[in-house]
Every structure is written in structure tokens, then in C-alpha cells.
Amino acid sequence: MSDPLSMVVVGAALPAAFGFLFQHLHRVIDRRAARRAEEAQAGGEEPEEPIPVPACVAGDPGLTEPDPERVERNAAELERLSGALSVYERRPERLTSGDERLLRELGTLRDLLEEIYGRRITFRGEQRPASGAEVDQRLRDIQGRVKGVVLPGDARPPDRYVVRQDVERTGPDSEVIAVEHRQPPSGPPAGAGEH
């Protein structure tokens, strides 16, 4: 069972914390629905505006790409949380630090979002590791390349990474990489401007 959202977060920061977590909940649910619609008919996803990180979040957790398998595995709980928390979105005056059910549901939501995004979400004042990427790989026999985190060149890396890689054996020419940030090409492509 999840711990309730810390009492440190509540008070003036509760509406911002709620809004941030609830927006991500609906983004994950919407992406799942869009993915299912795409499976039925071909089409591309439209780019989304990033959800602003409020000041009550310690650092930038870098919530960009939810893991589709983890979303599917937790779909029923995500839908349940959406229903349970939607009353607070419609009636923000009900967001109070004395509402233990609300804090418990927000704690559950945060845990799910951390699992789905593979990122820690820490609020200012909490006694837990800072927001950011966490990767925990336990690997037995590596034959080739393994990367903990690969960021495309246009992605802004999160403020913090924790990459744990526990490898038992590696084969010849094997490579284990914690974080790879692919840099975008600089300058015009080769041959540009030549006729």
C-alpha cells in the first residue's frame, strides 16, 4: 500500500501538487486511448505541450514518455484514480490537508506515475531522493551493448539521474552504458548549399 502524500506537501502547495499529478494522470490515460485508436487506424500522434513543473516540485522529474507496457498493466488503477480524484478537479475548494483519503489517493497516484515514467517525483521539503531519472538494471549475461538511458538530441535531460547496473558477465566487445545523450547534428547537413 502506498504512503499518503507527505504532510510537508500539503497546505499552500496542495493545489499545485494535485494539479501537476492530475494533469499527468490524464495525459497518460489520453495517450493510452490514442494508442488504441492508432492500432485501429493508422495515424500519428500530435506533439503535446509539456506540463509545467510547479515550484512545489523539487527539481524537474523529466516526465516525458510513459512506458506503454506499464500503462497497460496499471490501466484499471489509473481509471479508478481518475474517477476518485475528478471530484477535486471540479471542486478545488475540497482540496484540504485534512482529507486523508485525498492524500492517500495522491500518494498512490504519485507511485504509479513514478513507475510509469521511470522517474522520481519529489516535492520540496520531503525527506526522499530528489526528482529525476532512476534506472535499475539487473543483467546476467551481456553479449553486445546495453544502455540504461538514451536521450534523443532534442530532449532536455532531467536534472538528476540515478542509474544502477548490476551485471554478472559480459562477452567480448560488450559495452554497458549508463546514460547516452545523442547530440543533434550541428550545422547544415553535408552537401547543403552545394549545387
Image (spheres, rainbow, N blue to C red):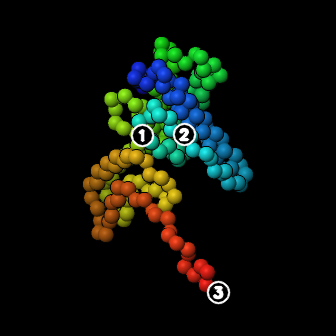
Closer to the chain start, of discs 3 and 1, is 1
Circle on res. 195 = 3
Going from N to C along the chain, the mark reached first, 2 or 1, is 2
Reading the image, the residue beneath label 1 is: 59
Q: Position of residue 106 (x, y in %)?
A: 49, 25
Q: Residues within 10 Å of mark 1 (few under 14, many from 20)?
A: some
Occupied quadrant, residue 79: top right
Q: Which residue appears at 40% of the width and 59% of the height?
A: 180
Q: Is residue 93 above or below residue 72?
A: above
- In the image, taking residue 85 as reference, residue 40 lies left or right, namely right
Q: Which residue is mark 2?
A: 52
Judge whether 177 appears above or below 2 on screen: below
Location of residue 172 (image quadrant): bottom left
Q: CA distance from mark 2 to mark 1?
A: 12 Å
Q: Residue type at mark 1?
A: Gly
x, y percentage for residue 64?
A: 52, 46
Which kind of residue does numbered mark 3 sit on? His
Quadrant housing the N terminus = top left
Q: Residue furthest top?
A: 98
